[in-house]
Every structure is written in C-alpha cells, then in structure tokens.
Image (cartoon, coloured by chain):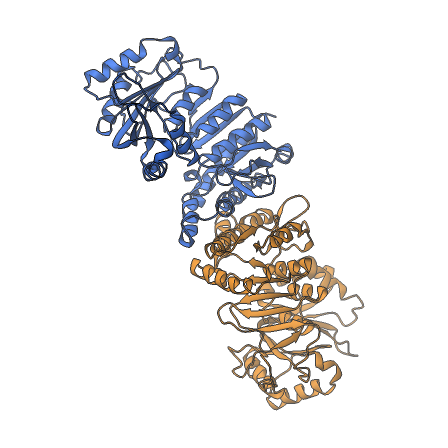
Chain colours: A orange, B blue
Amino acid sequence: MSCLVFKFGGTSVATIERVLHVAKRIQKEKEKGYDIVVVVSAMGKTTDKLVEMAHEIMPNPSKREMDTLLTTGEQVTISLLSIALQSLGLSAQSFTGWQAGILTEAIPSDSRIVEIQSGKVRRTLDKGHVAVVAGFQGIDSNNNITTLGRGGSDTTAVALAAALGAERCDIYTDVDGVYTSDPRYVPKARKLQELSYDEMLELANLGAGVLHPRAVEFAKNYNIPLAVRSSYVEDEGTIMKEEVEVEKDLVVRGVAFMSDIVRVTVGYEGNYKGSLVNIFTVLADNHINVDIIVQTILEGVEPSVSFTITKENLADTARVLEVNKSKIGYCHVNYEEDVAKVSIVGSGMVSNPGVAAKMFDRLHKENITLKMVSTSEIKISVVIPQESMLLTANALHDEFELAASLAIQI
Amino acid sequence: MSCLVFKFGGTSVATIERVLHVAKRIQKEKEKGYDIVVVVSAMGKTTDKLVEMAHEIMPNPSKREMDTLLTTGEQVTISLLSIALQSLGLSAQSFTGWQAGILTEAIPSDSRIVEIQSGKVRRTLDKGHVAVVAGFQGIDSNNNITTLGRGGSDTTAVALAAALGAERCDIYTDVDGVYTSDPRYVPKARKLQELSYDEMLELANLGAGVLHPRAVEFAKNYNIPLAVRSSYVEDEGTIMKEEVEVEKDLVVRGVAFMSDIVRVTVGYEGNYKGSLVNIFTVLADNHINVDIIVQTILEGVEPSVSFTITKENLADTARVLEVNKSKIGYCHVNYEEDVAKVSIVGSGMVSNPGVAAKMFDRLHKENITLKMVSTSEIKISVVIPQESMLLTANALHDEFELAASLAIQI
C-alpha cells in the first residue's frame, strides 16, 4: 500500500483542540487508503518553556541533558495525537525517536540521522495503524537521546519517508505553501505550485523559513516529493521535486531577503602574503557561520576580505577575532551593521545569461547601493543597506514578473 | 565503593528552587564518599496535568499512550536535576527507565519490574558520576514504555538498590519518618526510629501512605535497609530492616486508620450451597480490590458475606454485582457507607496473646460499635462507624502507650 508521511509543526498542535483538528485531517487522508506516518513537534511554546527552566538553573546546561529534557516535548505530542486518533476510531501507535529506530551521530543538540531502522514502524503500518513519530529526536549508538537541531522535525519526516519508500512527504505548517517572496512584505507575492529541490534549498538557506535546508537536502538525495501545505486550509500547497514541469518558463522563481546582517571587513598589511584560510578556520572552530565572502586583491590597494554574519553572532565574532588577532594576522577590522541581503533564485538562471544584468540595471534605476554581490548557478545575492531591503525585494519581484500567474493548474 | 540509592518524590522536586535544594542535599552525601543513585518522580502536579490533557480528548485513553505521555514527567526531572548537580560542580548523568535497563512486564499502567540490567548505571557510578534515574517507568520486551503504577518511583529506587547491591535506600519525602500513627489526627503520635519490613508492609497496606507496599516487599525480599527521611529536615528518619533492635519491647508499633470505606453485605437464599468463590472472582476480574472479608455461617440465619471496598470503587462494584447477579447467585446486597477501619500493627503481637483482648476491652469502654474484625499475625483491624475513627485511633494509641519514647537514640 502507498505510504504518505505527514509532519505537523508546533503551532499546528499547540492546543488539545488543534491536536484533534490534526487528527481529523489525518483521518480524511487515511480514508483514502494510504498507510500514514505522522511526525510531530512539541506543542506550541513547550520547548521554549523547557529551555527557560534549564536556564533558571544555569546559563550553559549540558547538551546531553538538554536533549533529554527537550525531547519530552514531542513525546507528549505523539501520545496525545495517538489518543486523539483513537478517539476518532482509528488505530494509532506512538513512537519516540528511539522507538522508531532513528539512529543519529553521537553529537548532542545538533545531531544528524545516520540510519533509520524502520522495521517496527513498517510492521505497525502493515497492521493498519497510523504511526505517530516524535520529530527532532533520535538516539546515538550509546543509547543517549539526541536532537537534530533546528528544523529537526522536518528532517525526521523526510528521512522516514525515504526509509519507508513513501510516495510523498507533506510538511503541514502555518503557511499554505512557498511563495515567490514573503507576502507580508511583498504584496504581489504569489504561491508557487512547484519548485525544484535546489530552488527550495537556496530559498531555505536564504531564510525563507518554510523548510529546513537539511530536510530539503534529504528529500533531494532520496528523490522524495516534498509538499508544504497548510494545517488550516485544504489545498495542494507547493510541491518540491526534481523535475519542475508547469512553470519551467519562469527564469527566476522567487525573491528572498534577510535583515539584521553584519558585514565584517578585515584589513591586512599591504605586504600580507598569508592565507585567508586562517580567519575562516578560526571562525568555523568557534561555530560561527559565515555567509557571503567577497575578496578582491587589487594592485596598490591594502588587501582585505569582507564577509557577512548574522547580528546574533556579532558579539561572538568580535570576541573570537580579537582573541585570535595575531594568529589571523590582520591589522584592523570593521563591523557594518544595518545591512540586509536580497536574493533572486531560479534554476532557469543558468541558461539565461541576462538575468544578472537585468537585476543590476533595475537596482541602479532604484538607486540602491550595492555593498556586496555573490552569485551561484541558481542564485544571485546582493548585500544592501537595510533600509532599502523591502524596496529592493518588491522591485525585483516586479522586474521578473513573479506576480503573473502562469496558468497554474491546481 | 559503597552505594546509596535516594528517592525524591514529586513535592520534593516541585519547583526549580526545590530541585536545586535536592541537588545540594545530594552533594553533601556525595562528599561523604558514596556512589550515589538518585531516583526522582515528576515535578509537583505534572502527572495530574498530563492526565487532564488526555482526558480532554477522551475519558478512557489507551494505557500504552498514557504511559508514553506520563513518563515525560520524570524525564523532565532527571535532566533538570542532572543540570542542577552539574551547576554545583558535580558530574551527573540522567537515565530514563529504558536507559537504566529497567525491564518490566508487558502490562501498561501497572507493570512490575522483571529485571534490571544495571550495567550502564554501574559504569556511570564507577566513573564518579551521580546517576539520576527516572522513577515509575521501564520498558517491556517489545520496547513499549511502561509505568509501574502508584508508588512506582519507590519501587524503582528499591529495585535499583537491590540490583546495585546498595548499602541502603533512602526515600526522601515530605514527612520525616514513619509515625506510631498519623500525627495530624493523633496528637501524641511519635516518630519511630526503626520498624521491621512486615510492620511497614502492614502499615503501608493500611494506607499509612508513606511508602508503597510493593517497594517495601522488594526491600524485604532483597534485604535492603530502607529509610524514610525528610527532604527538608536533616535527620535520620525511620529505618526499615529485618531485625529491629532498639524498640523490640514494643508489642504494638503503630495505629493506622482509613476513612471512606464501604461495607458491602451480600445475602444468599437460606438453602444456598454454592461457593463464595464466584463473587470474589467476579470482583477480581473487574479489578475491584476487596479488603476485609468476614463470613460466618450460623444455623438458622440466612447466609451472607461482608467485605469492605473503598468508596471510589462503590459505583463500579454496584454495577459489577448487578450485572452478575445470576452468575453469583445472591438475592440481595447492601452497601453501608461512612465506615472506617482502624488497625494496630506490631510484630510483637504474635507472641503476646493478650493484645486483642486489651484492644477490644478499650473499645468497649469507649463505646465503639464494632462492625467487622479481622486479624493477622502482626495486625488487628476493626471496622467501625466513621465518626468514631479518630476517637478509636487516639484511644488505641494511648492504650498501647505508643507515645512513650523508649530511650530512642538518634
């Protein structure tokens, strides 16, 4: 029998009422004859409350104990949702991460799944039960409880879908799909019907927030069709897959933007002959994520490198750079706050050389100051003053005619 | 190194502040050089709240799912207490029931421990860590999460003490020991320094409430000295062991009482020749606990049997008896509410034949109506009108001079 994996996030199961609503939603799909696996997150703000309790004791609690603490959140949801399904007359069985055979690396708080021993879930499905699995969690080879980090429940869902050979994995969330841009700030943003994995990956990495990049990566690697759908509204949502048919004429698929970025510029002595490896190794060793990196060595100009970080990493970065000044060998460093990043994404860009030119032309017309530019095969990002972010996003959305619906069949 | 097992109940860990208090308490004992295992319950009213959530969905949720739900309570406590111990500079590691190797029967909600694979806890102790174990929970051979029923955390503690060959098991609670009677109602009640397992077993079964009978039974079977101590006050508490030395002159060790009992009297036809087995089999099949059973067949008197149940089982009992009337073969049934049970307990009673006479004599003087009497080797119970309960308890406490401290050395 065909198998579907659904994932419901924290807001979708925030109250008993919503848990019951989710159960009814599952019932409808179950009645269509599918084997159904449901992956759930902790209810509403549960995780935050648990973190708060631990922080009342100490600011940096042990990661192992935090994982043991936080995983109770999903364990509550799986049992309540199973009970809710049973109250509708369905048979359902809950699985914690370890019960579902989700084996991870031995890295607390940000583990990756290494294997899913899905035999037990499979046998439960074969008996006609709905399997309700705790997202975000697993165990390592020493039977320690681990968690998968941010967006972990999405990853659990996609990984289970891969392990079970599911027909599709549906991520139910509080938005009804992936949009050409954020509809809260770009009024003409339009919901996409389809999207390639790579496009979603870029959008996710750009902070589109709908799906965690790791989950999309997993779906791409195992070629699992992945849908983003609304928990509240019944429609098809947006589906990600390898071959995107309907809208392939669309060169640019979406505009993403992210505020609260800091541009860091590190300057070296004129005769600096060392390697830039040092600075990025030091930052990586200190778990500081660096996004866009730009360097140009020009004759007669003091060598420097610029990169972007998120504002929340600013204090850490400043501390790490200060402590390692002599090791890195730079002579001065400058932090520029209040900058933002705007990106256009689309797999059609590779074969359309005019896209970048069109983008820069429009930005010039709009009088936007470009601070950094970075390109990939399916993405162009610009770093600009934060105050210009929404103007830029809307202008590019307009420039690439993303509002024009291309005969989308629902 | 000598090993101690401590158990802290729900009220002892009801808030972060109390969890920290418990951690400090453990630190003191750890500094004396012991290997320490701590068993904890869910914080405060957590379990009640979880039950409430499930009942919002349906009145009789699946027991398997309830076990999965409720065990999150202790899992929160083990991680928070481990973090609290770490914040004091101790190394500590948490264990859920399954991580601690607590294997139970495959009976949800009221399982018994069948084996403890304590190797992992042992190795943690050997590394000098405090092991913090979730009480009340285990797993069955199919990896289902199970719970041990009421008083389950006490049982976990004693069973672990047995498995690890601990020197002693200390049950920390909100009372500071076992008393000759309930000090809230018997003003002259005095804390006992020592008690035999059997005496405690009788007192526990009589509702003394300090310890669960199953835990005492376990301690007796494995000969683990078991102490009841206060989480708040630092003193020795009451210790249970096989040989009670100091107070062996005390013929009667304590007076226990329990209100809200119902006396059920079932009458049969005059010529009834059947077996009473029927009625008690039917009740047992319906999980209704029967306490005192009294039957006397007198010539010329209609045969009847009386037994006591708790008030909370009244509705169930009435239903079960009604449904099975023809099967049991009785002709009428009578329920008498507002009765209570008062018992005296002491291992010295076996060799002191005058105890019962002394008891009845005093009750007669106090004008107490006896409705039922039941005796065992170390206990005499009487069922009396509820309004006389406290008078009876105080009178018997006085009669057997339980207030007189017998040169107790603390």
- Front one among B268 and A8: B268
- Front one among A63 and B196: B196
Residue ranking furthest to the bottom: A365
Quarter of the picture holding the C terminus of chain A:
bottom right
Quarter of the picture holding the N terminus of chain A:
bottom right
Which residue occupies 43% across, 39% down? B10
Q: Is residue B213 visible?
A: yes
Residue A93, percent across and down? 55, 51
Residue A5 in the figure: left or right of residue B410: right
Residue ranking furthest to the front: B271
Residue B372, percent across and down? 28, 22
Residue A130, percent across and down? 56, 56
Above or below for A83 versus A406: above
Q: Is residue A61 visible?
A: no
Residue A19, percent across and down? 47, 59
Which residue occupies 59% across, 89% down? A366
Picture quadrant of residue A170: bottom right
